Amino acid sequence: MAVTSQELRPGADLGGTLTARQSWSRLPAWLRRVIILAVAVAVWELYVKAAHVSHLVFASPYAVARSFVSGWLDGQIAGATGVTLEALAIGMAIGIGSAIVFTVLATWTTVGQDALMMFTSMLNPLPSIAILPLAIIWFGLNEKALVFVVANAVVWPIAINVTTGFRTVNTTLLMVGKNLGLRGWRLVRDVLLPAALPYIISGVKVAWAFAWRTIIASELVFGTAGGSGGLGYFINKSQYFLNIPDVFAGLVTIAVIGIIVEVGFNMLERRTVIRWGMQATS
Amino acid sequence: MTIALQPDLGYSPLYIVEQEGWLKKALPNVNVKWQVLNSGSAIETGMITNHIQVGAGGIAPFLLGVNKGVGWKLLSSLDEENLWLVCKPNIKSLKDITSTDRISVVAPTSIQAIDLKKAAKTVLGNPNALDPNMVILSHPVSYQAFKAGRTTCALDAPPFEQEEVAAGGHVVTSSYQLFGTSTFNSTFVLTKYYQSHQQELKILVQQIKRAVNLLNSDPKKAATIIAAYEKGKLSEADALKDLTVKGTHWTIVPHGYLTYAKFMHSIGLISSVPRSMSSIELPTLKATPGN
Amino acid sequence: MKNQQSDVSSRSQPDVKAKEDGPVTSSAPLLSVEHVKISYRLKNTLVQAVDDATFTVMPEEKVMLIGPSGCGKSTILKAVAGFIEPVSGRISFAGSTNITPGPDRAVVFQEFDQLFPWRTVLDNVVYPLRVTGRSKPEAMAQATTFIEMVGLGPARTRFPHQLSGGMKQRVAIARALALGPPMLLMDEPFGSLDAITRTRLQGDLNRLAERAKVALLFVTHSIDEALLLGHRVVVLQGAPSTVAAVVDVRDINGPDDPHYRSIRRSLEDLLGAPGEEEPDGGN
Ligand SMILES: Nc1ncnc2c1ncn2[C@@H]1O[C@H](COP(=O)(O)OP(=O)(O)OP(=O)(O)O)[C@@H](O)[C@H]1O
Ligand SMILES: [Mg+2]
């Protein structure tokens, strides 16, 4: 656990004249990002205009924005996003549930720990998408296969992180909890879980990143059903139909969701582990 | 000149041209590269970005590209094949399909996908009625999935459809039944490229024609060449069986393009129907215009 | 080594009083530690930390545990708190030999990281009170009083990572004191404080113990601190340790006391000075 302090930014507020670098770093972070994004979009638009790239290869930001808006308005992207997020949510829920079972077994029994170690070292390095063919054989050509693949992507990073979190909980804190007469679930809820929170959050973060990549990749490969395909399928289909702006709009949607979730995690961390000076320093 | 094709016996005329080195002999000064790509969409992208000069693919993606302004035209057709919708015995008609049933096609824009939409429109009154049941699987995977009972129906191509029937399926409808005899695969080039390479392309079409003639006149010899091309993955006997499947006809003359185009237009997949065949085919076909 | 049960050091000192003179001798001991031996399991070997510890703490009595670093003082405290089970011997507390952790022996640990990082200073003190059944307003009032007492009123909304080591230790002290247990177990609680704060808190602890009628088992390195706070001093020797002596110091009234120097000297001898652990000797 590291002691945090305010971000120390070299060059800021040291008095004297303001250099360009200083005035840039004085802008709020969000504004700096917006400016970078705006410049990137402008360069993109200019490139598309100046280089005469085929509209079948590369879409201009304007075309993408139009596709994005109309895709959300007519429900196409919204529907696809819904399908993806639903499978993702179910898969993550199952993955987290199984991770909890594994964690409990691994924290309180040596056999459980050994089993978890073995499974994790075997299955965690495997890109979850690699088991898609197996999942299809086991579950059929339906959403269940996707859910399974996502659950598999989620369960190992969470189980291993939370187990590590529990196993490395400061013994003094545990003694303090016991000294207050806390036992069983109360001790877990009031001491063990918050103490392991940095690991839990980083586990869920890693799991989310795995799950998100996995489901999009699976949908790209697997295509699922045309009428109820997710974002990956939307992109794939748009590419087949040479609707390149739609391909980009799908990618933008993926990026935006990624950013929203990232911001959510940041907020959660700022309100918890960072505020408490507990964030794991890796 | 890079020529791209897909791993499917429907491209046999091109296999023969490559295997026999006919183009190399006819065009000794042209550096010809043959490239096998797994997806029609990859070939399409390669052509748009000018990495591939001659592409081969199905009728529907070609028409879609025309409509989207890819700027390509037909160089030659390769074959006509009857594509079967093979279903489990309990599916007597498409009306028996329920929401949990899966129907596999090779790509969302494949000729098979269009056939399925036509069947849905004819039988169920709505071309998109079967979209929720549609899954995208390559032919070999589709066959495996059908055999394993993961899918209820499969709409592939020879020889997979024959295997599917052998595995207990039955033919519910077929592309010839839905659209009449029509081209399966063809070759196409960007008009821009054609204008600067007319001579070479004319020679290429001659070689394709030669291969087509061989396939029609001496399938046994053709099978030997194909078996050699497949380097042991396919026996001569199997090749012969696959090349001479009933309903398959080798020809460089395109058929059925406008019929497909009209249907694709009617369900909103393309915004306009080509005015005439001559607007989508190159002069290489002028002697034997298609429809 | 001669293992004395006696209250007087082996080297007889004129200033050392017999424990029978104490004010609390009439009742039964609140805590009794009898021939306790404690080992830690390290991989496959046993590390013996305490060889033979015997002493008692009467209700309201303040007993100091003193001994060189690594001799097993914290270990004994943890055994009394119920975190470690002795290999042999017997511990009984309030008449029971079933020693499990509980708030009736509130502990102030030696380690700095004994506060819940996710709770503010105030919450760290309020939470134990709530857990042990105090109502919310009562817990708030109690917590505030003790936080003020350790001088952390202005820091009560801070999180532990925003405190210095000594401030954290003071919060832990406030937390234990606020619980008002029959017995306090404190492991070098003032070790990291500056001399002034230490003196003030020593005074506070003395007054509080008086008022709250709390028994105290207090680990220290400092002879002066032991003399200032203790009724009796348990001197540990060796590693694994044994009790070298139990010295009654309740009648010593501070450094001005005529007996102070001589009793201090005898304790130093017991601890095997000159190479004493803590040359500055507390305050
Ligand atoms: N968890 C543990 N595992 C193994 N050995 C331990 C453990 N804790 C303490 N010991 C050993 O037990 C002995 C006594 O340790 P203890 O912490 O009780 O000493 P102490 O008297 O409190 O020392 P200090 O004054 O430095 O705090 C030491 O030799 C130490 O190495
Ligand atoms: Mg200690």
Image (spheres, coloured by chain):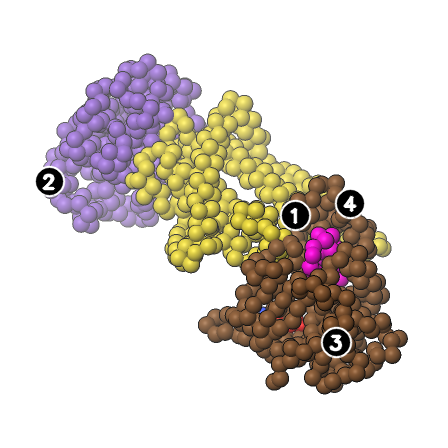
Whole-angstrom CA distance, mark 4 to mark 2, is 100 Å
Viewer-proximal residue, B117 or A243? Answer: B117
Amino acid at circle 3: Ala
Residue extent of the magenta highlight: C166-184
Expressed as whole percent of the image width and height from the top left, the position of residue C207 reads 82, 60
10 Å neighbourhood of mark 3: few (<14), some, or many (≥20)?
some
The correct choice, above or below, for A240 with respect to C154 in the image is: above
- Does the beta carbon of the residue at mark 4 sit less than 8 Å from ligand 2? no
Residue C18: image tag: 3
Give the image location of residue B264, x and y in percent: 36, 20
Mark 3 to mark 1: distance in Å? 38 Å
Q: Residue at x 74, y 68 (%)?
A: C191
The chain displayed yellow equals: A
Q: Please give the label number shown on residue B196.
A: none
Residue highlighted by disc 2 = B220
- Looking at the image, tell me whether mark 3 or mark 1 is earlier in sequence order: 3
The numbered mark, 4 or 1, whose residue comes first in the sequence reads: 1
